[in-house]
Structure formats: C-alpha cells, structure tokens
Amino acid sequence: MDSVTQAALGAAIGGAVLGRRLGRKAVLIGALVGTLPDLDVVLDYGDAVANVTEHRGFSHSLFVLSGLATLLALLTARFATAKDITLLRWWCFFALILITHPLLDALTTYGTQLFWPLDVSPAAWPIIFIIDPFYTLPLLLALGIALVSQRVRKACTWGLAISSVYLMMAAGAKIMVEQRLAPVLAEQGLQDAPRLVQPTPFNIVLWRATVIDGDRYYESLVGLLDGDHAPQLEPLIRNTELESAALAGHQGQRLTWFTGPFLRYENRLLDGQETLIATDIRLGFPGFHPFSFTLATRDGEMWQPVETSEQLETSRNLRLETLSRLASRAAGDTSALCASDFVAPKWRAERVVYRC
C-alpha cells in the first residue's frame, strides 16, 4: 500500500493500543514506526530487476519485524519515562504496528516476502488496489477525530474496525467475482489455467481477471453491478517464442520468480541495439503496465543476457477520461470500457478491436 495508508494504519494501531496512556504520542509514534518497513526503497541493488524484486523483501519479513519489535520493546521499556507500561504491552504496541504493514501489503498484487530469508515466492492475496481511498479515509478521519477530541483510543479503534470491515467486503467481492468467472473459464477449458483476479484502481466494485493460456492470455473486467452480463474473455498474446531467451539469464529467472507466468515479451530497437524486453502484466491496467525490463540483447543470431537490466519508462498514464470510463464501467455500464481498449493492436490475438 502507499506510504500515507501505512502511516495511517500504524498511527491508528498505536492509538488503539496505547492511546489511553500516551494520548497523541501513541499516534505519532505509530505513524513513524508504521513507515519503517518501506525505507528499503532507498536501497539501490544496481539492477532494475533486483530493485523491484528485492523491495518488500527483508524489511517486510515477519521474522525480521518480530525481532525488531522485540528490540524496540526492550529499549523502550528500559529508557522510556512511562515505567508503568509493561514490556509485554510495549511489545504488542511495536509488533502490531510493524507486522500489519507487510500483511496489508500482501493483500495487493505486488507481493510481499513475508517469510524472507526462506526461498519462497512473494505472498500475494490481492483483494485491494495499492491505493484505495475507501480504505484509507476511515483511518485518516479517525486520526483527525483522535487528535482534535483527545479521545484517542476510541476513535482509533473505530477507524480500524471500519477499515477492517472494508477488507472483509473486498474479500467477499472477490469470491463473488471468481464464482461468476468460473463457468466462463470452464466453457473455454481454462478452469485450471493460471489466473489472477484483482480489483481495478481505487475500488472493489470492478475487478480485472488475467488468465494465462500458453502464448495467449485473456483479460476480462467483471463488475459486481454487471447484472446478467456474462464476463467476456478478450484474447491477447505474450510472444512466448521469446520466453526461453528472456529467462536464460539471472535477471530473467529472478523476474519470473517474482511474477510467475504473468510476463509478456517483445523485441525492440533501443539505442540502435535489438533488445528483448519483458513486461509484468499483473501490475497497472491493460495498456498501462509500468514495469518493463531489458533482459537480453541480440548478438548475431543469439540473444545474450544483459549484465545489468534497466526499467523502461512508460509513456502512458491513466488520464481523467480513462478514469471516468473506469468509473462508468464499475457502475454497471458494460459498454463504457473493455479490458483491452487501450492495448496496442500488436498485442491482440485477433487483429480487430474487441468489443465487450
């Protein structure tokens, strides 16, 4: 999640746990501690793929954060002036603030290495977009009330309760979307295909499904307000003939460890050099994928893995018109937007504009 949300969550937990004893101080300390795991963004691993895949790594590990919570609790219990607060209470204060940070991150598509240093893929159970004002605003309003009224613990507890209910609603919405999608996938023989179902930007009403089927992948938008409109699978291509060359090097192997099969490949001329590029199709929105990496360059008839990968700048941003169409689609207007509307023609499995 974004830094504002993580700070707000940490502040609310701090106020709920020690607000009665520390008042506004608990909120301020909670906000600061709640942002600590994201300080890993300042680290530069010298490679674009490494920088992306190492983020939410050691600093988001449940093992590391549990140890950090213990250390902070011991130091605070030893040196803080509030001697009536027990070591266990301090530990609960720091542990809840720190551990809920990566747990919330794990509910987004990006993925979080909860069990670092174990060699397991990042945990990702996407039920919320990386920025969702409907989750964040209750926390911010609760903190505002807490700071103004000084009823810190009560206000923070209510904020946490409302935001938690929103997450439960999101989980329920995802189950409903998957149930609507299941017969469509079964009809196409895709019931066992790798798939990712996640909310579209800033809401939990409209969901995006991505299904992998070899060289093809399918995109679909499924809304809770779609009525009897059946989900439509819009076919696109991944260029898997380039996959073996893309994944031959260390960066390619690391990237597929991070993304799974949700990669699309292309060769492009960059600075006069034919370059193999992989794009993470999980993140962003079809036509607006922000993470593309150079993985190999052409040397005669062979592809040679690059020594250092680079992340390519995306030239497209979600515009107001796009967001307006997204909002209309979420409201149940199935003609307002198709999943593939902004995808370049070269990626379409069928060389026509697909109308959902």
Image: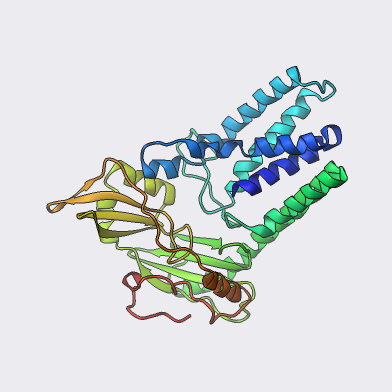
User: In this view, which residue lies farthest toward the left?
Assistant: 300
**Which residue appears at 62% of the width and 28% of the height?**
68
Judge whether 191 appears above or below 275 on screen: below
Judge whether 304 appears above or below 198 on screen: above
Q: Is residue 125 left or right of residue 50?
A: right
Q: Measured from the top left, where is residue 310 in percent x and y?
A: 34, 47
**Which residue appears at 66% of the width and 29% of the height?**
69
| Residue situated in front as seen by the camera: 295 or 321 | 321
**Which residue appears at 41% of the width and 54% of the height?**
291
Residue 168 seen from this side: no
Q: Is residue 347 left or right of residue 100?
A: left
Q: Quadrant of residue 24?
A: top right
Judge whether 173 appears above or below 310 on screen: below
User: In this view, which residue lies farthest toward the top?
Assistant: 78
Q: Measured from the top left, where is residue 38 in percent x and y?
A: 56, 40
**Which residue appears at 53% of the width and 62% of the height?**
197
Q: Measured from the top left, where is residue 80 in percent x and y?
A: 77, 21
Image color mode = rainbow
Q: Measured from the top left, where is residue 245 in percent x and y?
A: 24, 51
Q: Quadrant of residue 136?
A: bottom right
